[in-house]
Amino acid sequence: MTTSKVASMRDAIADLVRDGDTVAIEGFTHLISFAAGHEIVRQGRRDLTLARMTPDLIYDQMIAGGVARKLVFSWLGNPGVGGLGAIRRRIETGEPTPLEVEEYSHFGMVGRYTAGAANLPFYPIRSYFESDLPAANPRIREIESPYGDGKVYAVPPLKPDVTIVHAQRADAAGNTQVWGLLGCQKEAAFAADRVIVVVEELVDEAVVRADPNRTIIPGLIVDAVVVEPFGAHPSYVQGAYDRDNRFYLDWDGITRDEDSLQAWLREWVYDLDGRPAYLEKLGAERVASLRPTAPAPSGVVDYGQYR
Amino acid sequence: MTTSKVASMRDAIADLVRDGDTVAIEGFTHLISFAAGHEIVRQGRRDLTLARMTPDLIYDQMIAGGVARKLVFSWLGNPGVGGLGAIRRRIETGEPTPLEVEEYSHFGMVGRYTAGAANLPFYPIRSYFESDLPAANPRIREIESPYGDGKVYAVPPLKPDVTIVHAQRADAAGNTQVWGLLGCQKEAAFAADRVIVVVEELVDEAVVRADPNRTIIPGLIVDAVVVEPFGAHPSYVQGAYDRDNRFYLDWDGITRDEDSLQAWLREWVYDLDGRPAYLEKLGAERVASLRPTAPAPSGVVDYGQYR
Amino acid sequence: MSETSPARPASAASSAAFSKSEMMIVAAARELAGQRVCFVGVGLPNIAVNLAQRTVAPDLELVYEAGVFGARPARLPLSIGDPTIVTGATAVVSMYELFSFYLQGGLVDVGFLGAAQVDRFGNINTTVIGPYDHPKTRLPGSGGACEIAINARQVFVIMRQSARSFVKAIDFRTSPGNLGGAEQAERIRREGGWLGRGPSVVVTDLGIWHFDEDGEMRLDSLHPGATVEEVRATVGWQPRISDGLTATPAPTPEELRLIREELDPAGAYTR
Amino acid sequence: MSETSPARPASAASSAAFSKSEMMIVAAARELAGQRVCFVGVGLPNIAVNLAQRTVAPDLELVYEAGVFGARPARLPLSIGDPTIVTGATAVVSMYELFSFYLQGGLVDVGFLGAAQVDRFGNINTTVIGPYDHPKTRLPGSGGACEIAINARQVFVIMRQSARSFVKAIDFRTSPGNLGGAEQAERIRREGGWLGRGPSVVVTDLGIWHFDEDGEMRLDSLHPGATVEEVRATVGWQPRISDGLTATPAPTPEELRLIREELDPAGAYTR
């Protein structure tokens, strides 16, 4: 399969993300595709169900941008800093329209993607005992062990219409490699009907084939490969750039007030035509300040030729 | 935790494998610890339950050596070649004593280790529908989805007393890295009460820490690290040596007859005191012929320093 | 068209003579035309899919049971867990991931199965001959076959046929085929939410069988050198023979060259 | 012994003055003496466990919720998913593996939880203030807290105490503590096969609470500068005070030096 799946972010979102879809942009603090989220806002998608373990700044921005009717999640916040204003206002006031929520724990969300990826009707976990969560979310259900040794809880499969992940590198067929935190991207990708991979670097397939254990998503399930360096800012990419903690701290002020949030969206999303313009606006100095202080090479292992 | 867990094979088996234990030597064609199996035979363990997806030559040898009363498995054979005589004779004739069998499919065994590792009371899979396997093994049971969308099958957790795996490398604390086929070693190790890791090479912890995504078993769950180069022969170690297909072909003749098998055991197990003697007997030329024909380096990735 | 020859001819690629095994491999490979993702087990399927990739199905993607996707073996491995399928592959994954996400997740179009016994509806036994508790012959068991039969979109069976293997009633049903017939099988698959539609072809050393609307095997093509009488003599029931029975085209020189020079120069699979 | 000071003193390590946050971190770190494997979440637990590793628990192994084992952060991260916990770690694993094999598999001795509300039995709310469907304040939710409360062998709670957080009845039970008391909690844990034995300590800015035989919090130690009256005023029930109430030893100069110079030179955690 040598057909290239390389596409622009604009085309990938236009072709693969549709009004009403369930969309998962995954990545646990690491490799969050802010670039894809912004493009979804720019293209004015509506009525999305947004799924994500940690809705984070990107979903606060997307929900402020009016793309979503529902949120599926397990932890809602700006980690280490504070809250997410747009999401909190929608939930607490129901303004401008109510935001439906479907809530799990972290392991529950991981189990849901796993069941989705493995075509299982449920995933069993040892959580939720004596918690109010199953009452708040009736999709969390008890299940009896067939071995007569008690019950655990089940969560239902989550099968996004589209999963979007950012990665260090992929080849043109979509074979994708990641190092550093892995989160639940593999499960979320296999669970999805359509997959968009956004990468720092497009590499020759020989680079992928040199280290096949590093591949987390095979091209087989990938629909588009978007090359968007720094597309995960203000989150980070192991080995490429640091988390922009200053932005996360700044967000606390921006998100507290709907007007300041909308002004931010105008300035950083609507008035820009894509990630290159965003980076230009961010400035070379800020970008440079986020580079690692020194390399930390993995070392080489030998797979050996066998003829 | 800088305490070294490095031990000789003799001490590791003496300390950690006990009569009556459930023992899993895992590795799917790759990284099978023949060295540990032979030492268990030499030390005369009895009444073991041997668990393994593919009982392969190593369990044929161990069962001929009289260590086992029960076999838990999913595929029984010499792949690409033929049968396993000692095991077949025990099952077909019940001589010298019957061998109890508990049989699953591959995915069933993987699910069992996964449930064992994750402390789940069962693991659900889409297999066994309309098969005679659940009738043959009543531990394979139906389970109804709590979402009203039908049933799947459940397998029970498998928690070995001891899991033994071979790997390319580990540090003295037992942090273990593998490349090439991964099989179900991770799940089998986390499921076990005790873990023995046998490695081609003992490395400084800095080597492990340079590439933490490569670690499949953390030292936290490892009880002993045995350094035994070529300890997986006649199976193979990616990048270090090839599968000795000649031996697998030869085994077909040896295992057909109980006398020739016992003679082989005497010559290659009982009369030797360990792997170095085995390798000397195997001969430098045979060993050299199994080396890869050329290197196939993985390439380096950069994790980056962040200060 | 030459007679089938049991032994491999001395001057390989130039000769039009071929063995029964070679014909079986070539016929199986041709059936893969148009397929996308194939789950590969040990033995004959391995050489058939590799031949198909080089002939009728250049885009065929291989998923090896050992946990390898996109393998590019430099030699044809004896075992499916050989190091040559790992080096240069696209992805190497745990067996948990392979069975959960690739197979059960629905990515596999064709799964290959061998069999010690098969019945007219394509139900398969690879477990025991005789009673389970006191078998006359203990066979390897399921391996991944049971879940392949249920989760691969369709199943190809490849096996030599004989009165001992093509039987009226199998001794143990390891892997479900069309159960007691198409109607029952389709209902159970639908109600159970199976991804698999069951067996679609059985390729043997004598011919090619597809499954008719009743879910029963029907001989559609006869290999060169084989006869309908020979087929009847090696089937434990009254076999259905297609009204339009065709003759399987003999292996082409190029197919034979690929098998003999590239895929299996040592003749390990084609003896 | 000096008065507790709300702001960090100018000349840090040399001064015996310290903030309430510093006292809370030091007290939590000391509680980790003798523990082996700790599950680390975001915020105060992160600095407490790193301090414990450098003082009372040099062999403490850290499991970061983001999927990192054996981290050696070169700096103290703002978020638990920072790149500095990955570089040089022993193992980096998927969240599936972390929650399945490390936490649920029973390898975690101590899990740390924060709370917006806690009741006298250590039950925790991090979900909503007010009714779930129309919350007055929407909080972050469980994250991993619910499964940590059930699967970690014991739970340490670290939080500032106030009349709003130490309440008679929590608005939503995100994570179970000792339920309605020790007897009920022990029965349910036993019958349900939980690995966790529930909360063992609550460390606040005023003191240290352990759980008595009824499963209720009991103030065992009062931090320097805090008073029993202050404690009573910030608890929404009639709190149990130990007969042998002790005074928490103030942070040592070395503990303060580690916090201020090595772990949190920017004062992000200790403001």
Image (tube, coloured by chain):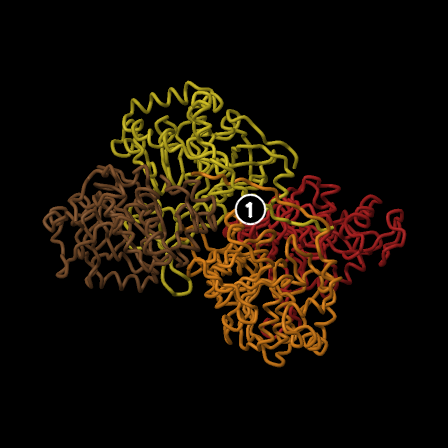
Chain colours: A yellow, B orange, C red, D brown
Of B130 and D40, nearer the camera is D40
Query: Is residue C47 in view?
Result: no
Across and down, in percent, residue C86 comes to 64, 49
Mark 1, other Cα within 10 Å: few <14 / some 14–19 / many ≥20: many
Position of A115 with respect to D18 (left or right) is right
Q: Quadrant of residue D163?
A: top left
Query: Is residue C195 in view?
Result: yes
Of D102 and B75, nearer the camera is D102
Across and down, in percent, residue B282 comes to 72, 67
The residue beneath circle 1 is: C106
Q: Chain of mark 1?
A: C
The residue most toward the top is A271
Q: Quadrant of residue A85?
A: top left
Disc 1 residue type?
A: Gly
* Residue at the (65%, 65%) spot, across then down: B77
Position of A251 with respect to A277 (left or right) is left
* Residue at the (37%, 26%) spot, across then down: A65
Across and down, in percent, residue B295 comes to 68, 48
The residue most toward the front is D14
The residue most toward the bottom is B96
For the C terminus of chain B, the quadrant is: top left
Q: Quadrant of residue B299?
A: top right
Q: Secondary structure under badge 1?
A: loop
